Each structure stands twice: as structure tokens, then as C-alpha cells.
Amino acid sequence: MFKIPNEVDRDRVLEQYKVLAKTAVKDGKPYITSITAGPTVPDPRNKGFNLAVKTTFASLEDMRYYDTECEAHRALKAVVGPVREDTVMAYYQSVL
């Protein structure tokens, strides 16, 4: 989840997620199972986070690759970094 105060910047970030979905590859093949991104519903419990993203991977190894080596993710961070406030809220879940 992100805090991005400017609506134009949020739109740019959402567009970059579309680019990420098309360009993120590992060993020459797409490796992200799914990406869902959009604005949060305005609510005080959001604590200012106004953009939510769910990225799903087939394995923990793929998620670690995304965090450390993926060029498409680096390009996304270059867009997000200058426009976000505060920290990024992230959590990781394993499905049994």
C-alpha cells in the first residue's frame, strides 16, 4: 500500500504497474502470477494509504527475485519513489 498524495502521480504509478505486468520476466519468461492495483476506498482506517497493490507469485523464490533482481520492478520503484510519502506498507502471505 502506498501514500501518494497527488492523483496524477497515482495514475502514473498505476500505468507503471501495467508496464510491469507486461515486462517482468525471469529467465526470459513471465513469472508474476497476477497483479491487481487500484485506489483504496476512502476510510480513516486506511491511515492515509490511498493506493493498494496485490502481487502474486508462484513461489517465495520468485518473490525474492522481484525484490532483488527484477529490472521491471526497479523501473517501477523509480516512478514510485519520488512521489510517495512515508513508507510502503507491505505484508507477505503464504497460502497453504
Image (cartoon, rainbow, N blue to C red):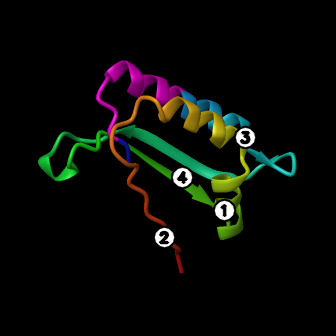
Numbered badge on residue 64: 1
**For the residue marked with disc 1, what is the amino acid?**
Arg
Crowding at dot 4, Cα within 10 Å, few <14 / some 14-19 / many 20+, comes out as few
Crowding at dot 1, Cα within 10 Å, few <14 / some 14-19 / many 20+, comes out as few
**Which one is in front, 6 or 58?**
6
Residues rendered magenta in the picture: 3-15
**For the residue marked with disc 4, what is the amino acid?**
Thr
Front: mark 4 or 1: 1
Q: Is residue 35 magenta?
A: no
Front: mark 3 or 4: 3
The residue under the point 39% across, 28% down is: 10
Crowding at dot 2, Cα within 10 Å, few <14 / some 14-19 / many 20+, comes out as few
Pointer 3: what residue? 71
Pointer 2: what residue? 93
- Mark 3 vs 4, N-terminal side: 4
- Mark 4 vs 1, N-terminal side: 4
Q: Secondary structure at mark 1?
A: helix
Pointer 4: what residue? 55
Q: CA distance from mark 1 to mark 2?
A: 13 Å
- Mark 1 vs 2, N-terminal side: 1
The residue under the point 49% across, 34% down is: 80
Q: Are marks 3 and 2 in contact (CB under 8 Å)?
A: no
- Mark 3 vs 1, N-terminal side: 1
Q: State the image coordinates of residue 32 (x, y, percent, origin top left).
A: 66, 51
**For the residue marked with disc 3, what is the amino acid?**
Glu
The residue under the point 39% across, 37% down is: 38
